[in-house]
Image (cartoon, rainbow, N blue to C red):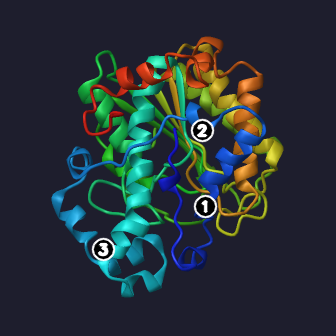
Amino acid sequence: VYSPDYNITFMGLEKLHPFDAGKWGKVINFLKEEKLIADDLIVQAREATDEDLLVVHTRRYLNKLKWSFVVATITEIPPVAFLPNFVVQRKVLKPLRTQTGGTIMAGKLAVDRGWAINVGGGFHHCSSDKGGGFCAYADITLAIKFLFERVQGVSRAAIIDLDAHQGNGHERDFMDDPRVYIMDAYNRYIYPGDGFAKRAIKRKVELEWGTEDTEYLQKVHTHVEGALNEFKPDIVVYNAGTDILDGDPLGGLAISPQGIVKRDEVVFRAARSRGIPVLMVTSGGYQKRTARIIADSILNLHSLGLLGREQAACALGSPSLDQMVRDSAKDFSNLSLQ
């Protein structure tokens, strides 16, 4: 699931944050070069509307985003505070709303087809009434709430959050909700250090500075398997941040590109072997080479058959793709394809 509208470009302002604000398009380009996908085989994400966002967000919070200085604080790009808000809405928030719509759509696609990957999304620091850490909309919470409310047979969800940072947004949103099981593995010393939100984590894996592949992959394997043995979800939402990469300026871990590819494989194997649909979002990752790593991981999942043959045939361009997307989106009237 992707849209060219995911990418943030405006007079170079996006370069003031370490996040590669064009990485999503680069992932798609790499996959095209490898002949895995083509333009007509991509599920086009639709921008989430206010009505969609209000399924989780408060009106008060959405109104706050009409103030440019609030958006500047959330995105950590101070000059945004001096831009007219109509520019901020179009150049900064619309891309994030489109990625959010993509995550919601991908949730339904995952249930229908066994797996789905939103090439964007993973805004795990945003909760219903507060944004931060480059996360303005709570797409993970939204995708799960949409499924709970509008898709029959989905009443339990597991969030496996393997971004380098604690996912305090969805943790705050699902603090007292027994239908949602959260596993979170993160660098214990970095942002956000949200002690209150940690109370929502059912399986907490706190990592040390500079954790490397062997220890990391052993912990991921042990705890992902343990989580899915302990809790039987109807869907896994996998927050696959690549800011665990060695050298990332914010993550503080030391995982190799091969380690990231293996990590994603571990999660998909655990979910697919149990017949649990998996929705992957790409989340954090602050180096220019992360787009190539995400693409390589998707190629690896495909080569191993973890993007199942029947499902892959549909998602990668069977004649029924358009109908599949329409059917999958029909419950989400504001996000369905026209």
Q: Is residue 50 left or right of residue 278?
A: left
Looking at the rendered structure, the secondary structure element under dot 3 is helix
Quadrant in the rendering for residue 62: bottom left
Question: Is residue 190 in sight in this rendering?
Answer: yes
Q: Residue at x 50, y 34 (%)?
A: 43
Q: What type is the residue that disc 3 sits on?
A: Phe
Which residue does the numbered mark 3 point to in the structure image?
86
Neighbour tally class for label 2: few under 14, some 14-19, many 20 plus, Cα within 10 Å: few
Which residue is situated farthest in the left direction here? 59
The three-letter amino acid code for the residue at tag 1 is: Gly
Q: Is residue 335 above or below residue 211?
A: above
Tag in front: 2 or 3? 2
At a point 40% along the width and 27% down the height, the residue shown is 108
Residue 22, numbered circle:
1
Q: Looking at the image, tell me whether mark 1 or mark 3 is earlier in sequence order.
A: 1
How far from the left and from the top, in percent, is residue 316? 61, 25
Give the alpha-carbon distance from disc 1 to disc 2, as whole Å. Answer: 17 Å
| Residue labelled with disc 2 | 39
User: Relative to 305, does residue 103 appear above or below in the rendering?
Assistant: below
- Quadrant location of residue 13? bottom right
Calculate the distance from the C-alpha at mark 1 to the C-alpha at mark 3.
Answer: 21 Å
